[in-house]
Image (cartoon, rainbow, N blue to C red):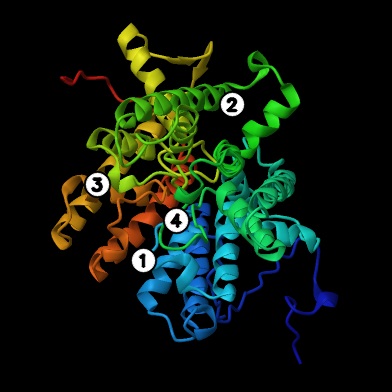
């Protein structure tokens, strides 16, 4: 039997070439798609969603009979409007807060105000911190924008400090107000009034328990009530970062440019507002006319403070002269400091645009504030916020004009008050139609979230310029 030398190694001789055939068998290869990594939602979306969730929960609770003073179910529209106003720190109401809601309803409104002031996501992040969970990068970005931090690493610490500072200032204000309210009220009622109005004032919400839509008109000659509330409003509208810098550095020249802008612009608006209200309302028999000189100064100053953010008033807003109402619209649109409980387009945005105008007038290509150059991306961001805010106020006012029969100035006043989270009204809020109520509610939400959400969104879209297109001139002016 012959054996094959190619397979039998014993028969191979030196120099033999062995050729092997490779038999390939078909194989099945399954290509599975790579599992996509779950990306967290953008911070701007989380910020908006958190406020909407808080409003939805508040609406459901306020609809319950236990929240109503009458013990009946509350209209969903009234509950939605009130919850939106509380979370957005506005103060506009369709029904009288003191008489329409039960003590439980008042507590719900107070909780919604506190959540809106602290920032709902900042509060959630604080809960994660207390439970021992570390914040993700996305959550740190959210907290940073909510509390006004410049760095990501300090966001978690700042969230704790913001909450503690807020509670400490509210407690101090409540102590002062308790001493004032205890003069003509029982101790328990005075304590509850002090706590409610201290929280509402610091958060620039403007809700009150005085009844009859009177706000603080019954205390227009009592500085022991108006001055603590004005102080709480001012502190809440200046942002934690500014207050922390003032406490640590103490001297104006040592402050950052951001804090200098807040302090200087706030002081100018306070003084100019006081002067304008004195000039326009000095002889008005329905406002400052009958008051003595000290009370005129007190109420003009108080109105100048509250008109930029808080819905309190010690004089009748509907009785203001058209000049004062129009000037009030401008102050409400500007609002308070960025990352504060105040609303509007913010002092920082307004001041940055002012410095940009100065740079253009000087023929400079760089915006300089207090000896420091401001990045052009911040100027563009401020311009975007201001122009979009003007466009929205125009559209919202036009929408109200279509469904309401009030005068144009009253509708503009109501729209800017809602957009600026102010809560001042000429008295048309309770008489709004359902369509008008929904427009104002949407304006409150967009006004509260718009500048902040837009700032977060634009900050996340900053990209380095690799290829610069060719320049070409455009006619301006």
- Check if mark 3's residue and mark 2's residue have beta carbons within 8 Å: no
Residue 387 at what x, y percent from top left? 30, 37
Residue 17 left/right relative to 68: right
Circle nearer the viewer, 3 or 2:
3
Give the image quarter of residue 444.
bottom left
Task: Name the mark on residue 94.
Answer: 1
Residue 142 at what x, y percent from top left? 58, 50
**Reading the chain from its start, which is encountered first: label 4 or label 2?**
4
Look at the numbered disc 3 and give the secondary structure of its residue.
helix
**Reading the chain from its start, which is encountered first: label 1 or label 3?**
1
Q: Which residue corresponds to the image point at 66% horizontal and 69% vertical from the top-left?
A: 19
User: In the figure, 135 relative to 226: above or below?
Assistant: below
Residue 123 at what x, y percent from top left? 65, 58
At label 4, counting other C-alpha atoms closer than 10 Å, the crowd grade (few under 14, some 14-19, many 20 or more) is: many
**Reading the chain from its start, which is encountered first: label 1 or label 2?**
1
Q: Nearer the viewer, residue 171 or 147?
A: 171
Look at the numbered disc 2 and give the secondary structure of its residue.
helix
Task: Name the mark on residue 412.
Answer: 3
Kindly report the distance in space between the C-alpha atoms of the residues bearing marks 1 and 3.
18 Å
Q: Which residue is mark 2?
A: 259
Residue 350 left/right relative to 413: right
Q: Which residue is mark 4?
A: 91
């Amino acid at each position: 039997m012959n054996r094959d030398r190619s397979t039998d190694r014993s028969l191979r001789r030196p120099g033999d070439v062995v050729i092997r055939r490779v038999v390939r068998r078909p194989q099945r290869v399954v290509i599975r798609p790579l599992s996509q990594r779950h990306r967290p939602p953008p911070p701007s979306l989380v910020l908006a969603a958190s406020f909407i969730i808080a409003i939805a929960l508040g609406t459901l609770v306020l609809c319950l009979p236990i929240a109503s003073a009458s013990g009946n179910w509350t209209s969903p529209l009234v509950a939605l409007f009130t919850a939106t106003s509380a979370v957005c720190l506005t103060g506009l109401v369709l029904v009288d807060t003191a008489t329409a809601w039960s003590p439980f309803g008042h507590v719900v409104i107070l909780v919604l105000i506190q959540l809106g002031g602290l920032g709902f996501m900042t509060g959630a992040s604080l809960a994660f911190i207390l439970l021992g969970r570390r914040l993700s990068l996305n959550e740190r970005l959210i907290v940073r924008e909510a509390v006004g931090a410049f760095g990501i690493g300090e966001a978690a610490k700042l969230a704790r400090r913001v909450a503690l500072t807020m509670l400490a200032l509210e407690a101090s204000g409540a102590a002062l107000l308790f001493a004032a309210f205890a003069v003509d009220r029982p101790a328990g009622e005075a304590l509850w009034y002090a706590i409610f109005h201290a929280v509402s004032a610091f958060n620039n919400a403007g809700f009150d328990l005085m009844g009859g839509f009177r706000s603080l008109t019954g205390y227009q000659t009592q500085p022991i009530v108006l001055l603590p509330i004005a102080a709480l409003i001012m502190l809440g509208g200046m942002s934690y970062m500014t207050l922390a810098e003032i406490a640590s550095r103490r001297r104006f020249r040592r402050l950052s440019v951001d804090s200098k802008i807040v302090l200087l612009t706030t002081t100018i608006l306070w003084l100019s507002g006081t002067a304008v209200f004195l000039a326009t309302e000095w002889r008005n028999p329905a406002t400052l006319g009958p008051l003595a000189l000290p009370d005129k100064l007190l109420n003009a100053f108080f109105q100048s403070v509250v008109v930029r953010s808080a819905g309190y008033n010690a004089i009748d807003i509907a009785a203001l002269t058209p000049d004062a109402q129009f000037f009030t619209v401008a102050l409400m649109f500007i609002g308070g400091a960025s990352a504060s409980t105040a609303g509007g387009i913010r002092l920082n945005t307004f001041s940055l645009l002012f410095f940009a105008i100065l740079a253009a007038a000087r023929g400079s290509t760089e915006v300089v504030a207090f000896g420091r150059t401001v990045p052009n991306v911040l100027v563009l961001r401020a311009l975007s916020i201001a122009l979009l805010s003007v466009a929205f106020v125009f559209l919202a006012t036009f929408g109200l004009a279509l469904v309401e029969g009030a005068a144009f100035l009253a509708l503009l006043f109501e729209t800017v008050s809602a957009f600026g989270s102010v809560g001042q009204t000429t008295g048309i809020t309770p008489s709004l139609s359902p369509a008008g109520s929904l427009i104002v509610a949407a304006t409150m939400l967009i006004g509260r979230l718009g500048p902040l959400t837009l700032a977060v969104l634009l900050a996340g879209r900053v990209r380095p310029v690799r290829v610069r297109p060719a320049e070409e001139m455009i006619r301006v002016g």
